[in-house]
Amino acid sequence: MKKIGIAVVMLFAFTFLAAAADTGSQTQKTPGANFEQRKEMILKRIDERIARLQEARACIQAATKPEDIKACREKIKPEKMDEGRPGF
């Protein structure tokens, strides 16, 4: 009974080590691809933020009275809450 228990533990240990070695080799194969994907995602988010800021700037520039600025701020506020996600 004791030998069976040791054999089962060793089987699990070898399975775990084999899986860990396989996972490590996969991540080392494509580090450039992951980097490029992440870089593109970051640049896309930056471009989106720039576009929102330009819209906000145009709205504020077009304002002729305090109520217009308040309306711009109300419009900008929901968009700003979306930026709570991690940027980089």
Image: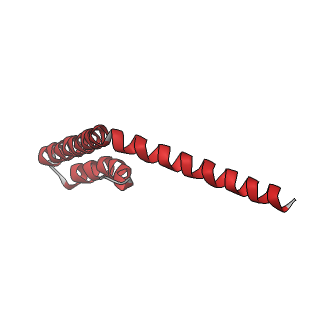
In the current view of this chain or complex, which residue is farthest to the front?
A: 3
Q: Nearer the viewer, residue 61 or 7?
A: 7
* Residue 31 drawn at (x, y percent): 30, 43
In the current view of this chain or complex, which residue is farthest to the right?
A: 1
**Residue at x 68% of width, y 55% of height:** 10
Figure colour scheme = secondary structure
**Residue at x 33% of width, y 47% of height:** 79
* Residue 22 drawn at (x, y percent): 49, 43
Image-quadrant location for residue 34: top left
Quadrant of the drawing holding the N terminus: bottom right
* Badge count: 0
* Left or right position of 61 against 7: left
Q: Nearer the viewer, residue 69 or 26?
A: 26
* Residue 72 drawn at (x, y percent): 25, 48
Q: Nearer the viewer, residue 31 or 81?
A: 31
* Left or right position of 68 against 26: left
**Residue at x 20% of width, y 47% of height:** 53
* Left or right position of 5 against 35: right
Work out whether 84 lies above or below 34. below
Work out whether 36 lies above or below 73. above
In the current view of this chain or complex, which residue is farthest to the bottom?
A: 2
* Residue 37 drawn at (x, y percent): 30, 38
